[in-house]
Image (tube, rainbow, N blue to C red):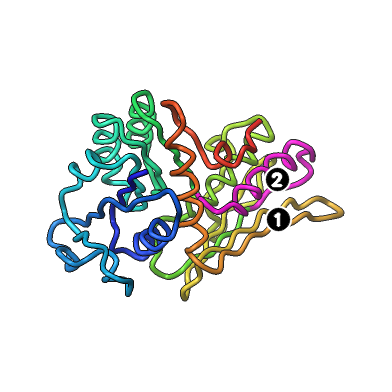
Amino acid sequence: MKVGIVGCAGRMGQMLVREVLATSGCELCGGTESPGHLALGQDIAARIGLSPCGLDIRDDTPSLFQISDVVIDFTLATITETHTAWAAQHGTKLILGTTGHDEQQISSITAAAKKTTIVKAMNFSVGINILLKLTKDIARTVDEEFDIEIVEMHHRHKIDSPSGTAIGLGEAAAAGRKTALPDVANWGRDRGTGKRSPGEIGFASLRGGEVVGEHTVIFAGNSERIELSHTAYSRELFAKGAVIAAKWANHKDTGLYDMIDVLGMGE
């Protein structure tokens, strides 16, 4: 299976390069960066301290989609529409770990999934996807006496807030309660916001240091509290999950899937 990586010189891209090169059945066929990037022309593997693989980092992303069986994308939401268009044009399977999409970008993903296989996940960690499943199950089980709050913390460099994973956890909780997240979400509380609304799902975001990712879902009842937490210690777990998804997607029919499908935990 030929795997291409867009954004291969970034922190996540470098992890993906290592994982693809180390995974049986995967062949790294190329990696790209944006025009003008300092890494252009460097050997993809040598740049991260591995033996040279004979592939230079290029800025010709359309060609990468053309030669790859699967492309892994953890770049920016602003270029997702371009990448989904190329995936659909060439029938390239796409593993999409980018977060922070708006409605138009989500629509482009849905449209492209009618022509190729896309696995889109807020988080490719196995543990987080178990957390998503448990969050939905508990939200379905407990009544609205239990207030739901989601707290996340990430490194100081993270751009979007709340994290894509936190939003995914909110969507899971809302689904468990048979409602839509936009109808019940409180994205942040500043001073003087008043008391909590019944059925609301609240979010709090913290940023600092080099925290890879911490997420906690709180179900706060009148007499007891349930907390589900996950802590990521290394980005390697996201790379491992993305490559697992790539191998799974390579044998799947056209459609839009998530990591729950990859792990066989779908209902």
Q: Earlier in the sequence, mark 1 or mark 2?
A: 2
Q: Which mark is residue 228?
A: 1
Nearest the viewer among 166 and 69 is: 69
Q: CA distance from mark 1 to mark 2?
A: 8 Å
Residue type indicated by callout 2: Leu
The quarter of the rendered structure image containing the C terminus is: top right
- As helix, strand or loop, the secondary structure at mark 1 comes to strand
* SS class, disc 2: helix
> Which percent across, then down, holds residue 10?
31, 63
Q: Residue at x 69, y 41 (%)?
A: 198
Residue type, numbered disc 1: Leu
- The percent coordinates of residue 32 (x first, y second) are 23, 54
* Residue position marked by numbered label 2 in the rendering: 134
Q: Is residue 226 left or right of residue 41?
A: right
Whether 131 is among the magenta residues is yes
Circle 1 Cα neighbour tier, 10 Å, few/some/many (<14 / 14–19 / ≥20):
some
Whether label 1 touches label 2, CB < 8 Å = yes
The local crowd at label 2, few if under 14, some if 14 to 19, many if 20 or more residues have their Cα within 10 Å, is some
Asked whether residue 241 is drawn in magenta, I would say no
Q: Residue sitting at 60 percent across and 47 percent down?
A: 129
Tell me, for residue 258, which label it has, or none: none
Q: Which residues are magenta?
A: 123-149
Instruction: Determine whether, in the image, residue 250 is placed left or right of residue 193.
Output: left
Extreme right residue here? 223
Residue 30 coordinates in the image, percent (x, y): 25, 53
The residue at 40%/43% (across/down) is: 95
Q: In this image, 192 relative to 100: left or right?
A: right
